[in-house]
Image (cartoon, grey):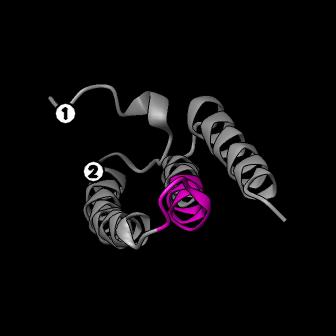
Amino acid sequence: MGITPYLTLAAILFCIGLYGALSKKNAVIVLLSVELMLNAVNLNLVAFAKYGAVPSLTGQIFSLFNITIAAAEVAVGIAILMNLYRSRGTTDVTDMDSMKR
């Protein structure tokens, strides 16, 4: 079994996440879609680390950094989303186009 199934799965996950991030109006769904895209990137990093030309732990280390950054992104994103929901009463992305209100 080669690298092709992993890359195919990662491409499918990334496309699903991209579709969700671009087409959905709920901010929580957009954040989940971004996380799905980051997980697809992590899958690629680990697959290339194992099956690449020079197998090493570099891809797995980058994947751990990516998971850490994703966790921080979710924490900040949820905090911003909660503040916007308190002030506007909605999680619709199209209503969050201005920071003046």
The residue that label 1 is drawn on is 101
The front one of 99 and 64 is 64
Pointer 2 residue: 87
Q: Position of residue 86 (x, y in %)?
A: 31, 58
Residue 37 screen position, x and y as percent: 55, 49
Q: Which SS does the magenta portion mostly show?
A: helix
For the residues labelled 1 and 2, the Cα–Cα distance comes to: 8 Å
Asked which secondary structure carries label 1, the reply is: loop
Inspect the magenta stretch and tell me whether residue 80 lies in it: no
Q: Residue at the location (60% across, 62% down)?
A: 47
Vertically, is 61 above or below 86? below
x, y percent for residue 72: 26, 67
Q: Secondary structure at mark 2?
A: helix
Q: Is residue 79 above or below residue 25?
A: below
Q: Nearer the viewer, residue 33 or 97?
A: 33
N-terminal of the pair, mark 1 or mark 2, is 2
Q: Is residue 42 above or below residue 12?
A: below
Q: Disc 2 marks which amino acid?
A: Ser
Q: Quadrant of residue 71?
A: bottom left
Q: Which mark is residue 49?
A: none
Q: Which residue is located at x 78 percent, y 59 percent?
A: 2
Q: Amino acid at mark 1?
A: Arg
Q: Would you say residue 41 sits in the magenta stretch?
A: yes
Q: Give the position of the C terminus as an image quadrant.
A: top left
x and y percent of residue 78 in the render?
A: 35, 63
**Residue stretch in magenta:** 40-55
